[in-house]
Image (cartoon, rainbow, N blue to C red):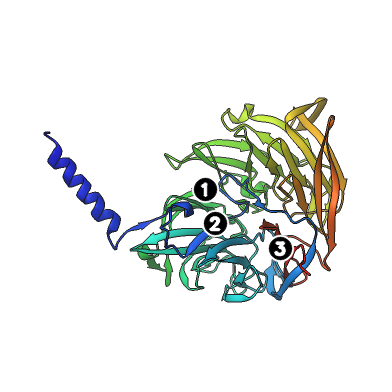
């Protein structure tokens, strides 16, 4: 055959590449070599790139199995110095298995990122940041030169001794699974009033996709061996920066251009909700914005993807005359035609919020659950519209989904989770609640399965895994909850 020599050379070159010591590839955990030390169990906020996997194994009853004191520290909010304790928003733990044992990664208000033994709560290591950690880590498996590694990608607030004018603000970092720093990212100053990083990174192949509170969306090569020394800091290569706000947004939002939501993969785009009031669709092929849905409000919650490839968008009531709530959006359509339905929630002043939904809406099959600033937990069927029910937003009228059940609790920013046909919810009170979703001919109902009182209140999203619930509280503690053995 004429090309046999060419094909032989290509095959040899491929083998050399695969087994070269310079190799750096990202592979799925289920593709790792059998001798791998690590297995990623729960890699990022809301479980996956579609932000619609919330864990497995909801416990049948609730009791404290163990607790670890994280403590707290100080942070600056404007000109105020505040003492914060425990964990905050979004604050969902992530989990991996190492040499047959499960470990939790959690960041706290004491400025520390920790690795905990999931069985006992024992602290394996604690790595110090410059400020409180609010967000959720992303775990990235890599394989280099015959060794498998895990990078823990975690953001923080700007830095207790930093300000907007500081030359270097390293509020996003990569730490390995043994607690050693790999690199830091200098989150540059923009028109935004923040340089924090609350969002979780999205990992696709060998790259990171991340929105920061400076209103910039970063596409990053996280390979530690390709880092460069810049501004006196070892930093990863930035492949692309995309601005997530429009001219005039800084004035309309008084500098609130922060992107707190984590990016979501759906189809051929990455979607991200920005504090500037827009949902941006970034084309994965061109790395350009080619879709934009405008709300005008502050957007904090991360988008979740439904089974019919639509997006669940939560809207806070801020900068708008309308009520906040939840949109179901079909991103395959032009933005002006994309709304499937809108569900408004009640107005209520609580802290600095006026209403709407700050956390995310979660989905399992036809069910969508969310908890709002108005204090209600809502359960809707996202496939069925309520006959004759409409809601107005920005002078347009949209249908509403069928409301299946509502429970009046307290305001919340933590995301409620649907796992195994049950809903786990926490908020600004001292209770963890688990509801059973009971199907009925007319829809469904929520029956309280169990609840547990924990002194303090919750801002963090829990993790459900293996018959246990892992979550932090503002009282300074991190808890493992489940069925207590006798």
Residue 389 sits in quarter:
top right
Mark 2–mark 1 distance (CA, rounded to whole Å): 10 Å
Give the class, few, some or many, for how many residues have Cα within 10 Å of label 3's Cα (few <14, many ≥20).
many
Residue 196 is at least partly visible in this image:
no
The residue beneath circle 3 is 471
Relative to 387, residue 285 above or below: below
Mark linked to residue 243: 1
- Which residue position holds label 2? 190
Camera-nearest residue between 336 and 10: 10
Q: Secondary structure at mark 2?
A: loop
366 to the left or right of 260: right
Q: Nearer the viewer, mark 2 or mark 3?
A: 3
Q: Residues within 10 Å of mark 1 (few under 14, many from 20)?
A: few
Residues under labels 1 and 3: Cα distance?
A: 33 Å
- Answer with mark 2 or mark 3, whichever residue precedes in sequence: 2
In the rendered image, the residue lying farthest to the front is 486
Given contact means CB atoms under 8 Å apart, are the residues at marks 2 and 1 in contact?
yes
- Which element type, helix, strand or loop, lies under badge 3? strand
First along the sequence among labels 2 and 1: 2
Q: Looking at the image, how many numbered discs can be counted on the residues? A: 3
User: Which residue sits furthest right?
Assistant: 408
């Amino acid at each position: 055959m004429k090309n046999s020599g060419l094909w032989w050379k290509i095959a040899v070159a491929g083998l050399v590449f695969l087994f070269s010591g310079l190799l750096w590839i990202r592979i799925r955990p289920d593709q790792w070599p059998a001798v791998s030390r690590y297995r990623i169990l729960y890699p990022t906020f809301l479980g996956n790139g579609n932000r619609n996997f919330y864990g497995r194994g909801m416990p049948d009853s609730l009791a404290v199995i163990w607790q670890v004191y994280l403590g707290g520290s100080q942070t600056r909010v404007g000109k105020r110095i505040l003492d914060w304790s425990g964990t905050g928003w979004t604050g969902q733990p992530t989990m991996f298995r190492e040499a047959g044992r499960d470990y939790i990664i959690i960041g706290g208000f004491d400025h520390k990122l920790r690795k905990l033994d999931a069985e006992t709560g024992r602290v394996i290591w604690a790595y110090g940041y410059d400020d409180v950690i609010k967000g959720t880590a992303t775990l990235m498996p890599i394989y280099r030169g015959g060794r498998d590694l895990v990078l823990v990608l975690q953001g923080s607030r700007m830095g207790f001794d930093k300000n907007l004018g500081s030359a270097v603000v390293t509020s996003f970092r990569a730490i390995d699974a043994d607690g050693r720093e790999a690199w830091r990212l200098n989150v540059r100053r923009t028109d935004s009033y923040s340089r924090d990083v609350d969002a979780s990174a999205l990992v696709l192949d060998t790259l990171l996709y991340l929105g920061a509170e400076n209103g910039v969306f970063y596409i990053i090569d996280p390979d530690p061996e390709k880092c460069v020394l810049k501004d006196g800091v070892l930093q990863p290569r930035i492949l692309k920066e995309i601005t997530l706000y429009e001219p005039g947004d800084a004035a309309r939002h008084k500098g609130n251009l922060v992107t707190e939501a984590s990016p979501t993969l759906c189809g051929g785009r990455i979607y991200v909700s920005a504090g500037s009031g827009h949902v941006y669709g970034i084309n994965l092929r061109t790395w350009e914005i080619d879709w934009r849905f405008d709300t005008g409000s502050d957007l904090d919650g991360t988008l979740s993807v439904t089974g019919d490839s639509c997006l669940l968008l939560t809207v806070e009531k801020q900068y708008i005359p309308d009520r906040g709530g939840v949109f179901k959006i079909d991103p395959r359509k032009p933005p002006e035609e994309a709304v499937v339905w809108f569900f408004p929630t009640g107005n209520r002043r609580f802290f600095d919020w006026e209403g709407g939904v700050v956390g995310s809406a979660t989905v399992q099959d036809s069910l969508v659950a969310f908890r709002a600033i108005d204090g209600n937990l809502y359960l809707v069927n996202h496939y069925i519209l309520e006959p004759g029910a409409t809601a107005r937003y920005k002078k347009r009228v949209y249908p509403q989904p069928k409301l299946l059940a509502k429970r009046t609790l307290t305001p919340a920013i933590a995301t409620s989770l649907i796992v195994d046909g049950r809903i786990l919810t926490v908020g600004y009170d001292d209770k963890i609640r688990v509801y059973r979703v009971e199907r009925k001919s007319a829809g469904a109902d929520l029956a309280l399965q169990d609840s547990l009182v924990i002194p303090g209140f919750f801002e963090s999203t829990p993790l459900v895994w293996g018959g246990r619930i892992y979550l932090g509280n503002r009282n300074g503690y991190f808890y493992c909850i489940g069925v207590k053995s006798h």
